[in-house]
């Protein structure tokens, strides 16, 4: 129903809204192709309790992965939150995420949570963690990984540079742009 009620009941009686907000933010932040819950999506539930979303899972096709085209690889635009019926993932045109985002309460809680994560420095730390993690590996490990896997991933749309350092720079820059886009459009 347009008022998010059915037979006098709201979806908020059945789900932990905050866990759904966090799941949406995490999935959209990384622009995970699985964020629409068609494949790898987990809920937890116990008798007498509401459904909780999570744990967050399966981020292998995310953060600029471009084998599925610019709708996924671009740091701009929504994925699960704004279905595009013309594409091959039109199955989620009536998906719960798109529906919940039409609820002013859910949308306000999502914006409030985003602002909380931003104020606490979580989003900034996410971006800086890319360089921190890469530095922790050291050049030998990064180069060995590159030699072992770069050829395989070139055919899958996962390579965005000609060196490990270029990949690190790509991910850091993509995340900076993604955070800025979501911040301006949420």
Image: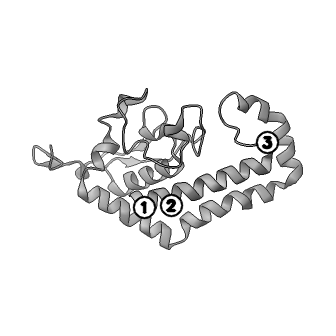
Q: Which residue lies under the disc numbered 1? A: 184
Q: Distance between the residues labelled 2 and 3?
A: 26 Å
Q: Nearer the viewer, residue 57 or 103?
A: 103
* Residue 174 vertical placement versus 151 (above, below): below
Distance from disc 1 to disc 3, alpha carbons, whole Å, reads: 32 Å
Q: SS of the residue at dot 1?
A: helix
Q: From mark 2 to mark 1, how far is it between C-alphas?
A: 6 Å
> Left of 186 or right of it: where is 135?
right
In depth, the one of 186 and 14 nearer the eye is 186
The image shows residue 117 at horizontal and vertical percentages of 48, 66
Q: Which residue is drawn at 73% across and 61% down?
A: 132
Q: Which residue is drawn at 81% across and 54% down?
A: 137
Colour treatment of the image: one colour
Q: Which mark identifies residue 162?
A: 3
Q: Where is residue 156 in the image (x, y as percent from the top left)?
A: 66, 29
Report if residue 26 is visible in the image.
yes
Q: Quadrant of residue 162?
A: top right
Q: Is mark 3 on a helix, strand or loop?
A: loop
Marks 2/1 in contact by CB < 8 Å: the verdict is: yes
Mark 2 or mark 3: name the one nearer the start of the chain.
Answer: 3
Instruction: Identify the disc placed on residue 14.
Output: none
Q: Residue furthest right?
A: 140
Q: Position of residue 53 (x, y in %)?
A: 41, 47
Instruction: Determine crowd level at label 2: few under 14, some 14-19, many 20+ residues with C-alpha closer than 10 A.
Output: some
Residue wearing tag 2: 180
Give the quarter of the image for residue 47.
top left
Residue 108, position as x, y percentages in the image: 30, 62
Q: Which residue is the extreme one toward the left?
A: 7
Left or right of 78? Residue 66 is right
Nearest the eye: 70 or 1: 70
- Callout 3: few (<14), some (14-19), or many (20+) C-alpha neighbours within 10 Å? few
| Element type where label 2 sits in the image | helix
């Amino acid at each position: 129903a347009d008022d998010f009620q059915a037979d006098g009941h709201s979806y908020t009686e059945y789900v932990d809204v905050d866990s759904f907000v966090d799941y949406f933010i995490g999935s959209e932040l990384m622009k995970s192709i699985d964020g629409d819950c068609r494949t790898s999506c987990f809920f937890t539930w116990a008798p007498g309790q509401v459904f909780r979303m999570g744990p967050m899972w399966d981020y292998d096709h995310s953060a600029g992965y471009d084998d599925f085209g610019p709708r996924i690889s671009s740091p701009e635009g929504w994925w699960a939150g704004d279905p595009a019926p013309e594409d091959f993932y039109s199955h989620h045109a009536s998906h719960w995420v798109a529906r919940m985002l039409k609820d002013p309460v859910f949308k306000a809680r999502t914006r409030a949570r985003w602002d909380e994560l931003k104020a606490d420095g979580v989003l900034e730390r996410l971006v800086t963690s890319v360089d921190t993690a890469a530095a922790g590996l050291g050049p030998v490990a990064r180069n060995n990984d590159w030699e072992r896997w770069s050829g395989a991933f070139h055919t899958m749309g996962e390579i965005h540079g000609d060196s490990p350092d270029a990949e690190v720079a790509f991910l850091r820059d993509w995340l900076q742009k993604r955070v800025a886009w979501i911040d301006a459009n949420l």
